[in-house]
Amino acid sequence: MTTENQHQWLQGDLGGYLREHEQAVFDRLVTDVFGFNAVQVGMLEMDLLRNCRIPFVFRTSDALGDIRSAPEFLPIRENCIDLALLPHALEFSANPHQVLREVERILVPEGHVVISGFNPLSLWGLKRMFSKRKDYPWQGDFLSQPRIKDWLALLGFEVVGWDMACYAPPFSNLAWRTRFDFLDSVGRSRCPLPGGVYFVIAKKRVVGMRLIKPNWNKAQLKPSLLPAPTQKSDTQKKKT
């Protein structure tokens, strides 16, 4: 991981643009996930769990956070996390498969993972291909969304949603980039324009396990549905 270079880049103009739009998507995605424990793995310059309703949240990276740990080996016991966030954790890992295996291990059945990554099939991916500079984030291994979905399927995850952000070209010059701010509005209207950052939301499935949850929408038992005696007993018979 290139934590120092990442921190410096995120404080710049282009990094600020990414933080603004990526934070907005995470704020929306984590709101309706419930449980007891949530973890954000890496990219601690942003508080991506600030809108999360889960009571116990913590953050981890190889340099900062509540727990200092590499994403490939998380010091968390298995089956105890309800929500895990992986903001750009896979493309800058030497072993992204191991990162996903760790997430699968710590998630409870039906737990969720939200992954963000730079889209290689976008203007951001095009800049990486032709960029002579190999600093953050252009030195990362941009992984396509279909590839991430295939890896998740192999681990037993079910992809339940996706999103995109950062549709403007990745110009470092603020004046040039603001000329294309209208592309973010066009992209949010579900135009088939590829965003520079994608999001994948997946749920951990366990074969042979069925979770029984309360049916809060089920109406209470009505008196008319109570069983009635089909035959009167001697004490119920009226005197003639």
Image: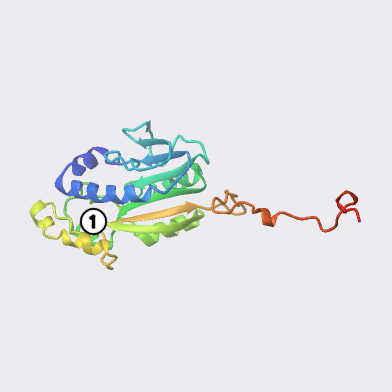
Q: Which residue is mark 1?
A: 166
Q: Position of residue 172 (x, y in %)?
A: 13, 51
**Horizontal side, residue 119 vs residue 214: left or right:** left
- Would residue 88 be visible to someone looking at this image? no
- Would residue 236 be visible to someone looking at this image? yes
Q: Few, some or many C-alpha atoms within 10 Å of disc 1 (few <14, some 14-19, many ≥20)?
A: many
Residue depicted at x 38% and y 38%: 70
Q: Position of residue 149 (x, y in %)?
A: 42, 59
Dividing the picture into quarters, in which one does residue 41 lie?
A: top left
Q: Position of residue 211 (x, y in %)?
A: 59, 50
In the picture as drawn, the residue positioned furthest to the front comes out as 240
- Whether 238 is drawn above or below 71: the answer is below
In the picture as drawn, the residue positioned furthest to the bottom comes out as 192
In the picture as drawn, the residue positioned furthest to the left comes out as 175
Residue depicted at x 46% and y 45%: 34
**Horizontal side, residue 232 vs residue 41: left or right:** right
**172 or 219: which is nearer to us?**
219
- Whether 122 is drawn above or below 216: the answer is below
Q: Amino acid at mark 1?
A: Cys
**105 or 212: which is nearer to us?**
212
Q: Tell me the quarter of the image containing the C terminus.
A: bottom right
Q: Tell me the quarter of the image containing the N terminus.
A: top left
Total number of numbered labels? 1
Dividing the picture into quarters, in which one does residue 230 lie?
A: bottom right
Badge 1 element: loop
**Horizontal side, residue 14 vs residue 42: left or right:** left
Q: Position of residue 110 (x, y in %)?
A: 51, 49
Dividing the picture into quarters, in which one does residue 218 lie?
A: bottom right
Residue depicted at x 37% and y 46%: 86
